Amino acid sequence: MPDLLIELFSEEIPARMQGKAGDDLKKLVTDGLVEAGLTYAGAAAFSTPRRLALTLDGLTAESPTLTEERRGPKVGAPEKALEGFMRGAGVTRDQLEERTEKKGSFYYAKVTTPGRKAEVIVAEVLEKTIRNFPWPKSMRWGSGSLRWVRPLHSIVCLLVDEAGAEVVDLDIDGIRSGNTTRGHRFMGPDAFEVTSFEDYEAKLKRAKVILNAGERADAIWQEATSQAFAQGLEVVEDAGLLREVAGLVEWPVVLMGTIDDDFLGLPPEVLQTSMKEHQKFFSVKNPKTGRIEKFVTVANIETADNGATILAGNQKVLAARLSDAKFFWENDLRVAKGAGLTAWTDRLSNVTFHNKLGSQKDRIDRIAALSREIAPMVGAEAGAAALAAEVAKADLSSEMVYEFPELQGLMGRYYAEAAGLPADVAAACEAHYSPLGPSDDVPTAPTSVSVALADKLDTLTGFWAIDEKPTGSKDPFALRRAALGVIRLVLTNDLRLHLDRLIDAQLLRHQIDTNGDEKQVALRDELLEEIARHGVFGSAVRAIVDQIEGDAPEWVAKVTEHSRDLSDDLLSFFHDRLKVFLRDQGIRHDVIDACLAMPNADDLTLLVKRAEALQAMVGHEDGTNLVQGFKRANNILSQAEAADGVEYSYGADVKFAEEEAEKALFSALDAADEVIKPAMEGEDFAKAMEAMAALRAPIDAFFEAVQVNSDNSIVRRNRLNLLSRIRETCSQVADLTKLDG
């Protein structure tokens, strides 16, 4: 069984494309070979800036001969139909066989597909792969029709067995396959022949090319950390940068340079971002001070002066880049210490956030108002929360963030500190964007939590108000991420918030800001604060509205005529995100649905506690059997209510009980109620679930010993009312009808 070696040698492939290109080459070739009838033992793909390579072990030497039966048209069908069938099957009339079946007589043909040699199939599959390769961007060169990411120079395609290496003959637009490749562009020898993958990899290394991208990355990191350790320093970890740099070089040469003293006063994040984005340098910090003092660059060539000339050139370019960063930093500091951050915030009135939602300044005003309302709910001081919201996005107008948008928030913290703002306000400037992803840290400082929640809730309610919701896989405004951020903020900080009230208030704020009168701002804010605390239909809200009857502005009608459709839809969106979040933590979907059906489903912390307790209960045998008993009781009761046209929900009396199991169930339900009701009031769901699970045995005994539909109508009605007590008792905890099974 031969081994296969493929190399596609070209001009430099962009680093960001190399990993996926290697995977695509492997998938396209292996899928094509398997589809053609060849099998293999193992495959591995490799990439460098100038080549893609693939090796397959244990490839079968030829595809098997296949024989299949094909059913043709009915006997007596038109001649043209029969001729088409024979032509497709590759048979003659005398090779057809007639068979009689239930639906009539049909022609059958045996079609034999002879096996083919591996080299024929490999050539066919590789040509198809090259001509249809899924590069994100590709180009044509010369007069040919072939497209590749960069001009393709040569193709190595070898089948290797005990007898030696055989070149698979292939010609694509004048590029003929062979057994010859090249090493490093500058340090490698002339073209050389290869005879196997092992020979290929070894000769490449002698020609100053490390084929394996992971090996190049390991070599870079090991040498960089060793050089830093020798000077008492540390390299700042950056997996993405390491992966990118490993794709820029075939023979990594690690060099460490020094940052001029003039730039050491810059924030370390500024230095790190500037060097990474512009130069692809690794930052090297002093662990004692946290300052970035040196950098690591990776060259693609060894030099006689050990990289001194390369370092000198890099340091010259770096100095120019950092001079720009220093200029931005000093200018921004002058503004922050002089006019303050509000000068930047005012500029944002000329920056559109969304054409239907106003400017960035309008958005900041909404976030500040909502943050003030949320603050007491999360243990923050209202004034500090509002101030933090007002300045949190000021750095969007700064020169540094204009140059490096990824530093937004972080620079806001530096500028807030420089402006003399309180520490919690400065921290909120950075933390309010978090969490950005499922693994991002969640803010816990009350002021930061208040602003972070307000920011995300305003975004969600705003886009819901203008009907710009996510559809399918499209989510251009990252609304799913914002909803998950709210969920993680609430759960991590164990917050007890009524989300529906906050949603109602902010949706109304969007409507008022669009249609309201500036003279009505005071009334608006008072009204929205009450909605955030008590809900749209709270008595305090009604009292405020009643005060202005007669002269009420138009938007007040929106309160009294409020429809829950929009806010309920957004709350449902939160619940969908919560389901995904909890399923990742191992909580069953039906358990979540059972808890969502209960009151106060907008209190996410309460909802999760209930779901965790229910999950624990149904994970045990007693809990599972209880659910079955409950469903049996509920089904019998529902059928009886439908048949009788009445609701059996009151009047179960132990004096009508005839069986001991029946009396025992009365006692068990009384005992369970004494535990469940106070436990639910105290939100001790675990205790309530435990008491409910204890009903398993008496319910099972009841159904084994008692016939519910007794001939005695009084006994039957009493027993149905007893089943209603089971439903009522169990339904205090969760809607068990939603559970599977």
Image: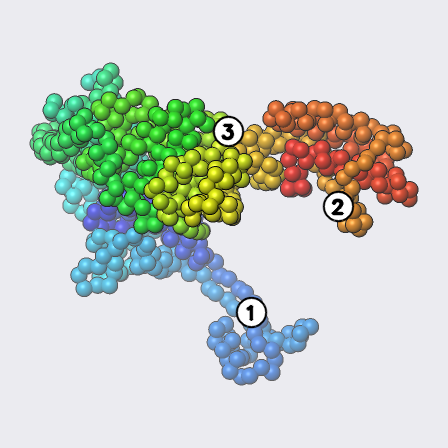
The local secondary structure at tag 1 comes to strand
State the residue position of label 2: 638
Q: Residues within 10 Å of mark 1 (few under 14, many from 20)?
A: few
Residue 496: mark: 3
State the quadrant of the C terminus: top right
Mark 2 or mark 1, whichever is nearer to me = 2
- Three-letter residue code for mark 3: Arg
Residue located at (56% from left, 33% from top): 607
Q: Is label 3 in contact with label 2 (beta carbons under 8 Å)?
A: no
Residue 523 seen in the figure: yes
Q: Which residue occupies the foreground of this view, 193 or 452?
A: 452
Viewer-nearest of labels 1 and 3?
3
Q: Amino acid at mark 1?
A: Arg
Please state which of residues 88 and 656 is positioned toward the viewer in this rendering: 656
Mark 1 highlights which residue? 70
Q: 497 or 199, which lies in front?
A: 497
- Residue 20 placement (x, y as % from top left): 33, 46
Which amino acid, by three-letter code, is at mark 2? Ser
Badge 2 density bin: few <14, some 14–19, many ≥20, Cα 10 Å: some
In the rendered image, is residue 482 in sight?
Answer: no
Q: In the rendered structure, which disc, 3 or 2, sits on the residue that comes first in sequence? A: 3
How far separated are the C-alphas under marks 1 and 3? 68 Å
At x 38% / y 26%, what residue is drawn? 382
Identity of the residue drawn at 49% across and 61% down:
65
Question: Where 294 falls versus 321 (above or below)?
Answer: above
Tell me where residue 393 appears, x and y as whole percent. 29, 35
